[in-house]
Image (cartoon, rainbow, N blue to C red):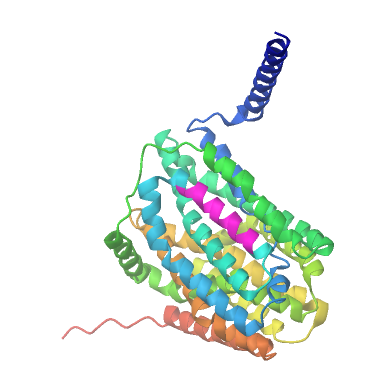
Amino acid sequence: MKKHFHFAIIQLWLQANLIKKTHYIKIMFSPFKRTKESNIKLYYLLTISTNLWFGASNWLYVWRRFMSFGQLGWIDAIGFAFSLLLDIPTGALADIFGKRLTLILSNVCTGTGIFVIAFSNSLTGIFIGNMITQVGWAMYSGASDALIYDTLLDIKKERLFAQVLAKANMLMSYAAAAGYFLGGIFYAVYWRLPHIIWGLSYLPAIIFSYLLVEPILDTEKFSLSGYFNKIRLGMRELWLPQLRKYLILILILLGVYFLYTWGFVRPAIATSFGFYAREQSIILPILTLSCAYLIRFLPAIQNRISHLKGLTILSIIMAAGFLFAAFPIGYFGIVPMFLIALAGKFATPWVSIVINKEISSSYRATTLSTVSLISKIPYVLIAILIGQAAENNLLSAFCFGLSFVIIIFTFISTTMAIVKPKPARSL
């Protein structure tokens, strides 16, 4: 009898605590009731949690413990090529299983891949972790924006899409700056810690993804033929007369900026100036926040100069940045790093504005996605070359050569815009 009494007491205590904990959980997630409207708030939180780049200012030094620059170039090239190839199956995955589940799997893969890198003790471990991470990033690419657009269509607020994206980009900059800075502090404590914390930051991302509501409307169904047709249509639109004069500048600016930010070019250049993990954790947030502030003046600048002139000036600024980066200027190296970041940060929205202006609404998204795809190809093709250049202390020669290439193509673009073909004489 006594045992039954004690058991009843324990059972009541457990039930009371369970109710209490359930109540706390409900309070905790009360702002995130699973409605379509809550998707927007969750999208912002997801943007923050997936852009805390704790490893961005120090990943090069973690990887270099286990490999040479030459090996790093191979791993980076294979990883990004793999990511490009995954655009096809991950698009199908989002259609088969839904964008919400795709985002959940994406964050699981990315967090897992970063954890594998964090605890790796060999080149092989980092290679495997990088490939898993690339799978996660490929699944995330496009799925989040597509989900939020379909959500806005569901609730008949699609006119707010540009506003939502603008706020998300602002939050992305702030989150990245915080990640750069804190990553430097974590690295000073323990060299594996930034990647460990970075991997952990994907736990809330998984929760936010889980709380999303799959929209009813699906603006596009994936198909292999549709995927390649989209690229073909995008290429056709890029070659239209009204956009042709911008084409070289668009590909140069976006291609070079992707090469600079996503690979190991930026940390390698920073290291050549004497900026190591600690210094980069301070410099990168400053550059990110400075550019985020200056980008506010883009509409005013566009009212004063034409799109062609603006993109030409940005190309010259980027070329100047790489030219100065070719010289051993020590801590003054922050100047070329700022010039490259400024040109790239301004180029991305400017190109989007040009395409939105010059291309009909039916093909805008297709053209933008095609430009995004093409801009990633140069780094995949030359990452191995960059690795060999860094391995043989020829990074300055690479920067000088890249600056020269940008100037040459900018000159060609300007000449093509000025020299218009003469109309044929009538007989």
Of residues 121 and 107, which is closer to you in this image? 121
Residue found at the far front of this picture: 1
Could you tell me which residue is drawn at 71 percent across and 14 percent down? 3
Question: Is 156 situated left or right of 200 in this image?
Answer: left
Magenta stretch bounds: 102-116
Relative placement, left or right, of 219 versus 104 is left
Residue that protrudes farthest toward the top in the picture: 1
Q: Position of residue 72 (x, y in %)?
A: 62, 78
Query: Residue 90: within the magenta?
Result: no
Overall secondary structure of the magenta stretch? helix
Front position in the image: 60 or 297:
60
Please tell me which residue is depicted at 69% across the width and 77% down the height of the picture. 66
Residue 403 can be seen, yes or no: no
Q: Position of residue 165 (x, y in %)?
A: 54, 48
Q: Is residue 35 above or below residue 284?
A: above
Q: Is residue 146 above or below residue 383?
A: above
Residue at (83, 64) in percent of width and height:
188
